[in-house]
Image (cartoon, rainbow, N blue to C red):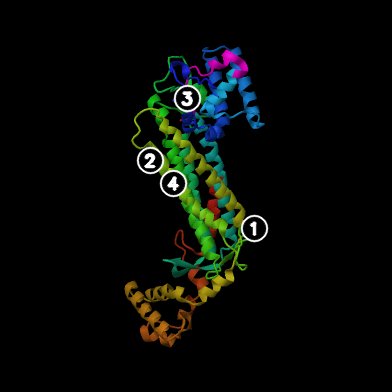
Amino acid sequence: MVIKPWQGRFEKSAHREVEKYTESLSFDRVLYKYDILGSIAHCKMLAECGIISHEEASEIVGALGEIQREIERGEFVFDPAFEDIHMAIEHRLIQKIGDVGGKLHTARSRNDQVCLDLRLYLRDVILSIREHILEVIRILTDLAEKHVEDVLPGYTHLQHAQPVSLGHHLMAYCEMFARDDERFRDCFTRVNVLPLGSAALAGTTFPIDMEWTARYLGFDRVTRNSMDAVSDRDFAVEFLGCSAITAMHLSRLAEELVLWSSSEFGFLEMSDAFCTGSSIMPQKKNPDVAELMRGKAGRIYGNLVTLLTVLKGLPLTYNRDLQEDKEPVFDTASTIINSLRILTMLLPEISFRTDRMAKVLEDGWLLATELADYLVCKGVPFRKAHHTVGQIVKYAIESGKKLTGLSVEELRKFHKSFEEDVKEVMDVKAAVSRRTSIGGTAFSRVREAIEEVRRELTIR
Ligand code: ARG
């Protein structure tokens, strides 16, 4: 039986079910590198401050390095009796070097240690997510550049609205992901704060140097209040929030991949490598990857709500409830990274069926606004022009004609301002080109937007 480090004041050992119920080693073992890194920093700081000797420190640091290698070689025994990764590593340390190992935990507590580990872990995760987001943006801008001049029926309410550049549509997602990147960058500034030294809740009597540890570990700041530091998980909530927004964007993009690859739309074809078949219907090619990407938003939102709910109503300072922060954070981190990664593989393999888009555009209903704008240019107030074109649309539907199929004589029956030059505006490319307002779909604007995003990417 394992003697717990906190066993001293206990007469009975814990109920056998308690160990299983309270352990976190089965999932917090992913923190091992960060735990060791944090311990090395702490140990060196203790020596710098004369709290332990430099010889003791180097013995501890050496053994921690060996433990890391044992873990990475799969030789480390993860015994749930040690509760969590912090105690498992410390136990092994003492097993290896004896009493000197017991000096490591001077001037710290698992309460500040676990916050430190989670912050170190999230720094890496955020950097990795940002790299993946930037790669997605890079791929989307390349795709957009290829399709600047391809015209797509734009939708509102999922009804044909106005023609737009396909590149413009793709760049809309770049904007979303660029905001996501910005949010993660901002979140990082609140993650990158050192809590170690807060100890259990009140700080420590030892003459430690938190600033030294912060510099060693690359933290921008140290926490200002030890009680807040050990109970604060805002940075983790923020991380889950940023991830939830990114997951929402991924889900929207995934939905369009599903919709556009349907037989009804047929606007794109995904590579076979990113689809699956049916066990019964031989003709099927299902967009499962995109569907899962859409669906995974569910668990990522769930993780955010889980942590918020865990934190709600917790009194200061550390409470064991806080151990429930880990699984949602780990799950979100791996889910979001996996989704972004698969997206970077899937996107370049998409072929857009611009012929199918052109076919839909032939109907010409998307040019109704052009007719109204034409009348406005002839001095008709917009509201009046809108009404007149509405009547023209009704007439065209009733007489089984397309908007582009109406003659100038027919149009003139509705308003005398229509002249021969109306033919020039009834063209999808012309309709797109004319929308030159900032952020508009004009080809020239889309090209500018691509260049701007690329410029920003290089300075991020
Ligand atoms: N495994 C714990 C957690 O993740 C570590 C901190 C435990 N501290 C304590 N006083 N029980 O929150």
Q: In terms of sequence position, does the residue under pointer 2 or pointer 4 come before the other? A: 4
Magenta stretch holds residue 39: no
Q: In terms of sequence position, does the residue under pointer 3 or pointer 1 come before the other? A: 3
Q: Mark 4 falls on what kind of element?
A: helix
Magenta stretch holds residue 113: yes
Q: Residue at the location (54% across, 18% down)?
A: 104
Q: Mark 1 falls on what kind of element?
A: helix
Q: In terms of sequence position, does the residue under pointer 4 or pointer 1 come before the other? A: 1
User: Which one is nearer the viewer's eye here, 25 or 211?
Assistant: 25
* Residue 269 in the image, given as x and y percentages of width and height: 60, 64
Q: Nearer the viewer, mark 4 or mark 1?
A: 4
The crowding category of the residue bearing disc 2, from other C-alpha atoms within 10 Å (few below 14, some 14 to 19, many at least 20), is: few
Q: Residue at the location (59% across, 51% down)?
A: 342
Query: Which residue carries the number 2 mark?
Result: 309
The crowding category of the residue bearing disc 1, from other C-alpha atoms within 10 Å (few below 14, some 14 to 19, many at least 20), is: few
Q: Amino acid at mark 1?
A: Ala
Whole-number angstrom distance, CA of label 3 to CA of label 2: 23 Å
Q: Residue at the location (62% across, 53% down)?
A: 345
Whole-number angstrom distance, CA of label 4 to CA of label 1: 30 Å
- State which region is magenta: 95-114
Q: Which mark is residue 302?
A: 4
Query: Which residue carries the number 1 mark?
Result: 273
Query: Which residue carries the number 3 mark?
Result: 110
The crowding category of the residue bearing disc 3, from other C-alpha atoms within 10 Å (few below 14, some 14 to 19, many at least 20), is: some
User: Which one is nearer the viewer's eye here, 114 or 93?
Assistant: 93
Name the quadrant of the N terminus. Answer: top right
Is there CB contact under 8 Å for labels 4 and 1?
Answer: no
Whole-number angstrom distance, CA of label 2 to CA of label 1: 40 Å
Whole-number angstrom distance, CA of label 3 to CA of label 4: 27 Å
> Is the CB of mark 3 within 8 Å of ligand 1?
yes
